[in-house]
Image: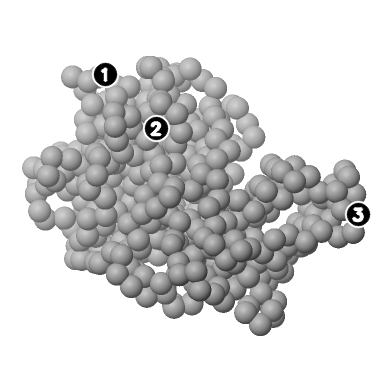
Amino acid sequence: MRHPVRVRSRRRFGAAVLVLACVGVPSFIVGQPVFDLEVRGKGFRRVGIQIESPSFLENTVTPPNLVREARDTLGRDLIYSGFFFVLDATGDPMTPWGVPRDWIVAVDPSSRAPYRVESVWRSDGSASSVDMRLVDGAGAQILGKRYAVRDPGGVRPAMHHFADQIVRQLTGLPGTAQTKIAFARLAGKSSSIVTVDYDGLDERTVTTQQTLSLSPCWGTGRSWLAFTSFVDGQPHLFRLDQGSKRLRPISQRQGLNTAPDWSEKRQAFALMLTTDGNAEIYRTDAEGKNPKRLTHHPAIDTSPSWSPNGDQIAFTSDRTGVPQIHVMDADGGHVRRITRHNQYSDSPAWSPDGRWIAYVCRREGSLQLVVIAPDGTDERIVVRAGSSDSPAWANDSRHLAFSSRRGGTRAVYVVDLYTGLERRLSAGSQEAVTPSWSSE
């Protein structure tokens, strides 16, 4: 029997058992992205954006590192969005620091970008600001913003905001550049909850307790994180407010209190409890009060995931003999099985647009990342490599974070479902598991 520290997923069915024991390629149309995972790499067209050289007002003394950080951050954000090919001022493909080579789109040297980003910097020596403009091929302004920036730490949030404004303006979809991903980083027999910007930078450890903490879940407006922690010796659910180091207990019922998922629409948690002696799905309010048991079955029911409108919950159950993905109404009624291949299936995650449920399935000797429509149709394999678990959607319903073992170390990765491109998010040699992607 494995040591509990080897629990690897906030939703993994196997994790619950262990603890109990101790796209695709759309044709790009501005404003009308088409989600199609069936064929990759054939005909996907990105829109070009050229990032011009910065201009400086007279007598400006803006530090070069601010300008360089702004350029790299904006270029990285636009490339990672997946909607654009990005050119530098000379018309060559832009290569921001840290972007994997296969994410850089090779374009014909004669390709012209229909959009340009211009910037004008000003500084008085103690404070800097930058005017950012998105213009079309004729030079007409589409978008304009002014940002005050004092250091590289202030430049990144400004460029993330402008990148998301560009994505929203040109596609009608939310951008991911301002979002964060939380995950658990394992170290020996303990683990810490870590947050990181969506691009893998600005990593911060938010828990200080020397214990096992897993399964983070973002709360309203990214103002708090909920997660399971053994800080009091038992697997209980706690909440950590932004800027605080003090854990607030949410659920300290007997047995397991784990696999939390927060519904903004319902203002409620779905989680797995064993307080009745069996693994069941419950619903509680934000403070862990007014618990309502939703499943009533002698099988193990775990890994709940709310639908975006809060009307349904996807979950894992072995009530048919092999763990499979099921869906039920928010009150626990109308339970139906949506996976029917009898292959081990776990970790459902409902996409923000409601069109897909991502999960992991054991096939060909490994856990593969799969998406399926909520009615059980249109199943697609997304990631085959490694052994993957814990899928977590970005707010654009285009990108998925997940944990995967590659080369002996389990790390957090991100995959673009339109292109199939992947990038490693977590750094270092320590294992990173159970990612959760913020909605904003």
Kindly identify which residue carries mark 1: 3
Residue 309 visible to the viewer: no
Q: Secondary structure at mark 3?
A: loop
How packed is label 2: few (under 14 Cα within 10 Å), some, or many (20 or more)? many
Q: Quadrant of residue 92?
A: bottom right
Residue labelled with disc 3: 59
Q: Is residue 78 left or right of residue 185?
A: right
Q: Which mark is residue 432?
A: 2
Identify the image quadrant of residue 37: bottom left
Pick the residue in front: 284 or 272: 272
Looking at the rendered structure, the kind of residue marked 3 is Asn
What residue is shown at x 70% (from left), y 66% (from top)?
A: 118
**Residue 300: percent from the left, percent from the top?**
19, 38
N-term mark: 1 or 3: 1
The residue lying at 52 percent from left, 37 percent from top is 195
Q: Nearer the viewer, mark 1 or mark 2?
A: 2
Of labels 1 and 2, earlier in sequence is 1
- Amino acid on which disc 1 is placed: His
* Amino acid marked by disc 2: Ala
Q: Residues within 10 Å of mark 1 (few under 14, many from 20)?
A: few
Residue at screen point 40% across, 60% down: 398
User: Which disc is residue 60 wearing?
Assistant: none
Query: Is 201 or 349 nearer to us in this picture?
Result: 201
Note whether 240 is above or below 93 in the view shown.
above
